[in-house]
């Protein structure tokens, strides 16, 4: 798990282990991704900024439900929001989260369609 700029890791038989803080933060990220609606929202806004109404329409949920999910994602630091006039536009925070979403959904697509890994 060593990468450029990484903090020192705990050692176990010569294998670098993530710290408790790193493992805890990663687990909290996975917990936020465990809801299919949130995962769909994150996939949408990883492609392009979207407002709540557009997100709700594309996923077939109410704007209220979309707003509730976006609030949780924003509090978890997974989503950025910016004002555009009266609208608020949401986007996934950072390239790591984009990659994680793409990999998770790509793996699911391969499993469901029988495509080799």
Image (cartoon, rainbow, N blue to C red):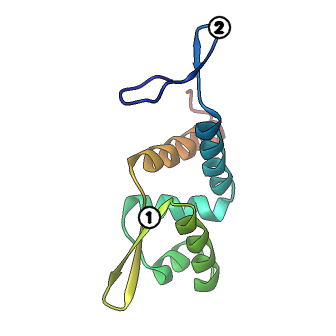
Q: Is residue 14 left or right of residue 86?
A: right
Along the polypeptide, which appears first: circle 1 or circle 2?
2
Please identify the residue farthest to the bottom as the structure is shown.
86
Residue 34 spot, x, y in % from top left: 68, 53
Location of the C terminus (image quadrant): top right
Q: Residue at x 36, y 65 (%)?
A: 48
Residue 64 spot, x, y in % from top left: 62, 85
| Above or below for 87 versus 102 | below
Residue at the spot of label 1: 45
Q: Residue at x 63, y 77 (%)?
A: 68
The residue nearer to you, when weighing 76 against 61, is 76
Numbered disc total: 2
Residue at the spot of label 2: 13
The residue nearer to you, when weighing 88 against 101, is 88
Helix, strand or loop at mark 1: helix
Query: Are the two marked residues, 1 and 2, in contact with CB atoms closer than 8 angstroms?
Result: no
At label 1, counting other C-alpha atoms closer than 10 Å, the crowd grade (few under 14, some 14-19, many 20 or more) is many
Q: Is residue 34 left or right of residue 101?
A: right
| Above or below for 51 versus 91 | below
Q: Residue at x 61, y 69 (%)?
A: 72
Q: Is residue 84 left or right of residue 44?
A: left
| Above or below for 38 versus 63 | above
């Amino acid at each position: 798990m060593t990468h450029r700029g990484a903090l020192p890791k705990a050692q176990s038989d010569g294998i670098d282990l993530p710290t408790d803080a790193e493992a805890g933060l990663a687990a909290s990220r996975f917990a936020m991704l465990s809801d299919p609606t949130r995962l769909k929202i994150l996939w949408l806004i990883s492609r392009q900024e979207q407002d709540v109404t557009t997100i709700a329409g594309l996923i077939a949920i109410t704007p209220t439900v979309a707003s509730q999910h976006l609030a949780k994602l924003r509090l978890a630091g997974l989503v950025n929001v910016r004002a555009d006039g009266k609208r608020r536009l949401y986007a996934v925070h950072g390239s790591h989260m984009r990659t994680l979403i793409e990999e998770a959904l790509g793996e699911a697509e391969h499993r469901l369609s029988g495509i080799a890994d």
